[in-house]
Image: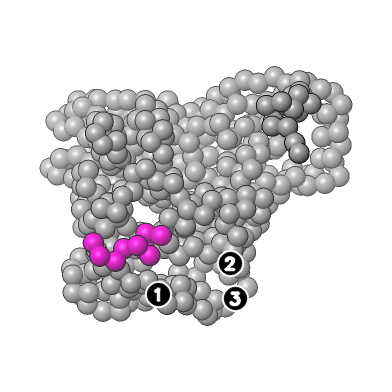
Amino acid sequence: MSLPESMQYNLGGQASVPARTRLARFDSTNTSYVSESNNKIIIPVSADGFISTADSYLYMTITNNSTTQPATLDGNIACVINKIEISVQGSSGKVETMDRYSVYHLYDQLWNMSSEELTFLNATAGGCVIQESPLGWSPIGDSLAAGGGQASWTMKLKMGFLNDLFQKALPMTLPQFQLEITLNSATAALTHHASAAAHTYTITNARYYAPVFQILDENVMANYTQSLRSQTISWVGQCVGTIINTNATGASTQSFQLNPRYQSLNALVTCQRQADKISAAASDCNTAMNMLGVEKYQYRINGENMPSDGIDYTASTDIARAYREASRSMAKHGHVYAKSHGLTALRFQSANAIGTGSGSGSMSVALKRFSDDKRLIFQGLNTSTNSAPTTLQVTYASTNNAVSDLTTFALYDCMWILSPDGMVVATF
């Protein structure tokens, strides 16, 4: 027999170590950036304590440069980012890179958005105006008026280096690292009038904010410093590789080369977007995906078919397996399925490329072995040593009447190791 916890007075929390916390601000190296010219934002980050990246965010002001046409954010402020690279001073190469960042960020957000986050993003990131009845998501973000309309927004960066699976802070003594953010063109980032082909936008006040902790207990810090001299420190996050293919029109079975090589490949998510819509100023270039013409798909990895019997797909009548596989693939660490408030069955099967009815379907395969245990890392499929090609085979019907871009996101675990000499190595 046991007392309920409400009566167990011997239970309690532990006192926190004495510490000091401040919200640190890291400014970009330039004051302004224009989408079609000087479009790379560089932000150096260095602190005299532990950087709590779990609570960090990017801040920026966006200005519509068109004198005649208004524009809206495609999804939210994440739409302006084409690529993010992270490098660490004294370490060779990039420790992380994500291409087509805006497409992944907005898709991941859609799959993992609760109703609470929907309202939060509307207030902080320029997300859609809330639909009161029913409460729902829309790709139509904040509107920027013609003639210099502007707004300031924030966003959390979805980079594995900055998002340890167990929310660890970046270690003290980590050398300065650098965020390199390449902007999208105005056509890709904004949704605006079709005649505004020469549309541009300007980004100012680009800053990265993060809490920085300083431990005030001398004994704790002495032990930490001693451990740094004799052992490595590591943290783990999920990274995203980007693989790009293009399909052909017409009824046929087509094979697309992927070939990701990782120790722990957690999932493959293929987003199909019509090529003519991506380059159209009035389309939702980042948020509109579709399953146009898809009758069946199957990945082949390490010489095996995955899933073993392939996934049949018919809009309205047979979408369940495709939806379930996508939900498993986009689930957060320790969860079996993603928890989405905004991605309904209707949106998953829609082929629209603009407005509230934009489609969000994808071809996916989840590859984690034990996806419900938060304690485990490197649970994905090891493709690093297998020479067999990885492909996606898609059977298209005659309704496949438009050339499409197929962007496949390879989700994988990566471990960063900080050695006593200050070098940082990414292992994946």
For the C terminus, the image quarter is bottom right
Report the residue at 54% width, 51% height from top.
Answer: 335
Locate residue 273, reporting x and y percent: 28, 58
Report the residue at 22% width, 51% height from top.
Answer: 353
Q: CA distance from mark 1 to mark 2?
A: 18 Å
Q: Which mark is residue 381?
A: 2
Q: Quadrant of residue 317?
A: bottom left
Of tags 1 and 2, the one toward the viewer is: 1
Q: CA distance from mark 1 to mark 3?
A: 22 Å
For the N terminus, the image quarter is top right
Local secondary structure at mark 3: loop
Near-viewer residue (93 or 405)? 405
Within-10-Å neighbours for mark 1: few <14, some 14–19, many 20+ = some
| Residue stretch in magenta | 316-324
- Type of the residue with mark 2: Leu
Q: Is residue 228 left or right of residue 47?
A: right
Q: CA distance from mark 2 to mark 3?
A: 11 Å
Q: Which residue is mark 1?
A: 310
Report the residue at 87% width, 26% height from top.
Answer: 219
Q: Is residue 320 left or right of residue 3?
A: left
Q: Compared with residue 299, is residue 217 higher up or lower down, i.e. above or below?
A: above
Locate residue 109, reporting x and y percent: 41, 44
Of tags 1 and 3, the one toward the viewer is: 1
Within-10-Å neighbours for mark 3: few <14, some 14–19, many 20+ = some
Q: Which mark is residue 386?
A: 3
Q: Determine the residue located farthest toward the front in the rendered image.
A: 1
Is 385 covered by the magenta stretch? no
Local secondary structure at mark 2: loop
- Type of the residue with mark 1: Gly
Locate residue 26, reporting x and y percent: 55, 27
Lower sequence index among marks 1 and 3: 1
Lower sequence index among marks 2 and 3: 2
